[in-house]
Image (tube, rainbow, N blue to C red):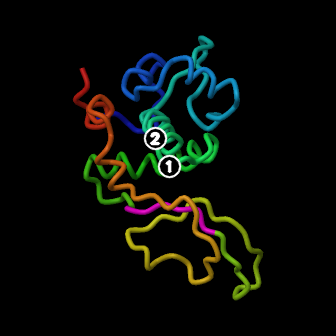
Amino acid sequence: MLDPDAYVLSPLVVTEITDIRPDLLREYRFRKLIDAYGQMQPNGHWAYSLRDAVGIWAGLKLFTEAKLSRASALGVAYRMAPDVIGAIRGTAAWRKFHASVYTDDTDTGGAHGWDASWRSNRLEDLPAGALVVDHLVDVELFAAAVPPELRAAIMGTAE
């Protein structure tokens, strides 16, 4: 199976397995919405990882269906992509829920703020001081909705 973090997918392959239009992928790059995604290669072309492809697909889904802003959708999607891959592959390390959590951490005397990467298998594990929970995503449902071409790439059965 493909290493989820190896930069081996061309932009063309990403557009084919995620159903994102090539011009939209270029626009996201131009508008700096996918700065965390991909890696410039020595030949000047971009290469993407499987994590990037899953994140781009999930980001587009969060934008179009959940009505998140493009920037928020792509950020949330990038953080949850490894768990979507894990859910499809059946690895033990994936977590069912992802969220951005705002806590008032006064008990420890520390600062308060956003933890954009909360993840757990149980909603009961949300921090006790959670004042706001935003962008709560059920990774398992996302994994079930992954299109066949992307699922085949995740499972290593793509042609």
Q: Is residue 117 left or right of residue 84?
A: right
Q: Are marks 2 and 1 in contact (CB under 8 Å)?
A: yes
Quarter in which the C terminus is drawn: top left
Is residue 123 a member of the stretch shown in magenta? no
The residue lying toward the viewer, choosing from 4 and 137, is 137
- Picture quadrant of residue 96: bottom left
The residue lying toward the viewer, choosing from 156 and 54, is 54
Is residue 100 a member of the stretch shown in magenta? yes
- Picture quadrant of residue 114: bottom right
For marks 2 and 1 on the same chain, the one whose residue lies earlier in the sequence: 2
Task: Tell me the amino acid under the disc marked 2.
Answer: Lys
The residue lying toward the viewer, choosing from 65 and 113, is 65
Vertical relation: 109 (above or below) 140: below
* Residue drawn 40% across the image and 26% down it: 19
Q: Is residue 24 left or right of residue 12?
A: right
User: Which residue appears farthest toward the bottom when viewing the image?
Assistant: 107
Considering the whole magenta stretch, tell me its main secondary structure: strand
Task: Tell me the amino acid under the disc marked 1.
Answer: Ala
* Residue drawn 39% across the image and 55% down it: 139
Q: Provide residue 72's location: percent of width, then percent of height.
A: 62, 47
Q: What residue range appears in magenta?
A: 96-101
* SS at circle 1: loop
C-alpha span from label 2 to label 1: 7 Å
* SS at circle 2: helix
Mark number, residue 149? none
Mark number, residue 61? 2
Q: Provide residue 128's location: percent of width, then percent of height.
A: 57, 83
Residue at the spot of label 1: 66
